[in-house]
Image (cartoon, rainbow, N blue to C red):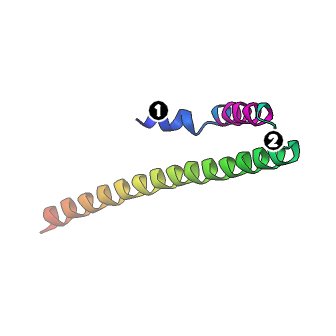
Amino acid sequence: MRTFWTKISSRKFLAALVGIITGLAMVFGLNENIITTVSGAVMALASVITYIIAEGKIDAAAVGDAAKKIEAAREELKKETKEAG
């Protein structure tokens, strides 16, 4: 499932999707200015959302690593306390 969301959120896929939608809009006679404005807005929004999701994943991984290090230090401290006592 993760691979699916990775592919859906890729810029290449989004650009292809916008291209298809733009082509269909032209076929059905929408105004070019509207098509250009909407396409630009969709791509900008998609880029921002993708960036936010990617940064969130990076931050989550960093927090996970920090938690593992804290747990390892806690276990080591427990071990040293037992040996001393």
Q: Can you give x and y, in whole percent of width and height, for residue 47 in the image? A: 68, 47
Q: Amino acid at mark 2?
A: Leu
As drawn, 40 above or below 66: above
Is residue 12 found inside the magenta-colored segment of the image?
A: no
- Of 31 and 44, the residue lying toward us: 31
Which residue reaches farthest front? 28
Q: Position of residue 76 (x, y in %)?
A: 26, 58
Label 1 amino acid? Answer: Thr
Q: Which residue is mark 1?
A: 3
Q: Which part of the image, by quadrant, shows the N terminus?
A: top left
Q: Is residue 76 left or right of residue 84?
A: right
Magenta segment's dominant SS is helix
Left or right of 48 in this view: 79: left
Placement of the C terminus among the 4 image quadrants: bottom left
Report if the CB atoms under discs 1 and 2 are less than 8 Å apart.
no
Residue drawn at x 46%, y 54% as measured from the top left: 60
Residue in view at x 60 percent, y 54 percent: 52
Q: Position of residue 81 (x, y in %)?
A: 18, 66
Q: Which residue is mark 2?
A: 30
In the rendered image, the vertical position of residue 36 relative to residue 15, given as above or below? below
Dot 1, how many residues are within 10 Å of its Cα: few (below 14), some (14-19), or many (20+)?
Answer: few
Kindly identify the residue that appears in the image at 53 percent across and 54 percent down.
56
- Measured in 3D between alpha carbons, the distance from the residue under mark 1 to the one under mark 2, in whole angstroms, is 35 Å
- Extreme residue toward the bottom, this view: 85
Depth check, front residue: 35 or 1: 35
- Camera-side residue of 19 and 72: 19
Q: Vertical placement of 80 versus 12: above or below?
A: below
Q: Element type at marker 2?
A: loop
What segment is highlighted magenta in the picture?
A: 14-26
The count of marks equals 2
Q: Is residue 66 left or right of residue 29?
A: left
